Structures are given as C-alpha cells and as structure tokens.
Image: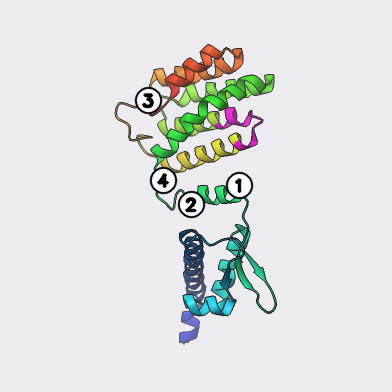
Amino acid sequence: MTSFAADAEPERPSFSALRERISQSVADGLVQEIEDTIARENLPAGFRIGTKQELCDRYRVASATLAEAMRVLRARGVIEVRPGPGGGLFVANQSPLIRLAHSVLKLREGGATVNEIVAVLDALDEAVLRDAAQHRTEQDLAELDALIAELAEVWADNPVAGLHCNWRLHRRIAQISPNAVLRTFYLNLVDYIEAESVGESSTFDIMGFHPDTDERLQIHRDLIEAIRTRDESLQRDAIVRHRTLGR
C-alpha cells in the first residue's frame, strides 16, 4: 500500500514554489513601501532608516524577507548598509541618473499608458532621425533597407508581424545615434510600447488611426529615404507625417 507521505511527495515542489512566490511578493511589497516612504517623507541621504531588527519588527517580516528586500534596494542604489554600533540601513546618496532610472522603472507600476509613452516617443523621433541621418553608414542603410522590405511583405496581411517589424525598424534607426542617453531612452520606450500593445487588433486607442495603411507604410519608407539623403526638409516632413498622436 502506498503511504500518505509517498502520495504527498509530488505536492512538495509545488508547495515550495508557492511559498517562494509568496515570500518574493512580500519582499517586493517591502521594497515598494521603503521606496515610497523615502520619497513621501523626502528623507535625505544619510538618514538612518533603522536596524535590521527594527525593520523586521516594524514591517512584521522575517529576516530572510528583509534580506531579499535589502538586496534589491542596494542594487537600485536606494539604501546603504553600515555595520557596527550606530549602524543599520541608511538612505543612499543617489546620483540624479540613478533616481531617473528608478523613476522610469516605476512607470508601469504607476499605470503609464501606451499613449503617454507614444507622446514622448513622438517628441524624440526628430532627434533620433537627425542623428541617424548624420551618422549612418552604408551598413546601416543596407540593414534599414532589409527591414523596410520585410515590413512591406507583412504590413497588410499580418498585423502582429507588421507591428513587431515596425518596432525593429525603429530600434535599428535609434541604434545609429551616438547619443547614449537618447538611444537608451528611446529603445526602452519602444520596448514598453511593444510589450503593452503588440498582439492587439489595434495598436493605439486613437480615433482615425490605422497602423497598417499604405500611407503609413510609405511614411516609413520616407523615414529611411530621409536618413539616406540627409535631406533636412524631407526629415521634417516625414517626422510630422509619422507622428502617431497627431493623426
């Protein structure tokens, strides 16, 4: 006869996984709470948040949960840990760039919409296109031509594939820019939009906007031509016609 213990054995991995997910969820919540407290109370760099034991007692969490939250907070540059008497967890002296990076990471948690992100992307398009035209190489042009040809093949018949290809094209244009800040922000915004919109029958909730029209495809061809010719008037015209939220 099979024992109860033997019958229960297959359940142990799933229970362990569930417990791990619960623990991780608590740690994530603690990370959010500490970050929110620092921001809400405008705690200055060097402010002593408390000892590990004080924080465990304050938030009623296990030491292992606090340790995981501390790992994340330290990786984000939010806190620093000082040992010895008078030590504990302190608010770190974050650089403006680190604070900016963490603010961007919180966009999804804060409920930023695709249209809000697209509005920013539209504003950056001109700088990205200008850099691409100024710094493009023959290899860049060859790869852009290959992408626009691929885009044309799937544009009307396969909307989901067309959207994926569209964003690959925009990423490739942005990758030409030597401006690391512009390039990084643009690429991350594209990632956000694609993750939130691709797979839907309509990319954006904009009246009158259809992403798979012949006109829209021609606009993308014109973007590549503006990069190729370095014609500034063509660049401006293509960007104005490309703006999603202006349609």
Looking at the rendered structure, the secondary structure element under dot 4 is loop
The amino acid beneath tag 2 is: Lys
Which residue is label 1 attached to? Answer: 97
Q: Earlier in the sequence, mark 3 or mark 2?
A: 2
Q: Nearer the viewer, mark 3 or mark 1?
A: 1
Which residue is label 4 attached to? Answer: 112
The amino acid beneath tag 1 is: Leu
Q: Position of residue 24 (x, y in %)?
A: 51, 67
Please name the residue shown 45% across and 60% down the image: 40
Instruction: Write down the region rendered in magenta.
Output: 171-181
Q: CA distance from mark 3 to mark 2?
A: 27 Å
Q: Position of residue 95 (x, y in %)?
A: 63, 51
Question: Can you tell which mark lies on residue 246?
Answer: 3
Q: In the rendered structure, are the residues bearing label 3 and label 4 in contact, judged by CB atoms less than 8 Å apart?
A: no
Per the picture, the main secondary structure of the magenta-coloured stretch is: helix
Magenta-drawn stretch contains 175: yes
Q: CA distance from mark 1 to mark 2?
A: 14 Å
Looking at the rendered structure, the secondary structure element under dot 2 is loop
Looking at the rendered structure, the secondary structure element under dot 1 is helix
Q: Splitting the image into 4 quarters, where does residue 75 fall?
A: bottom right
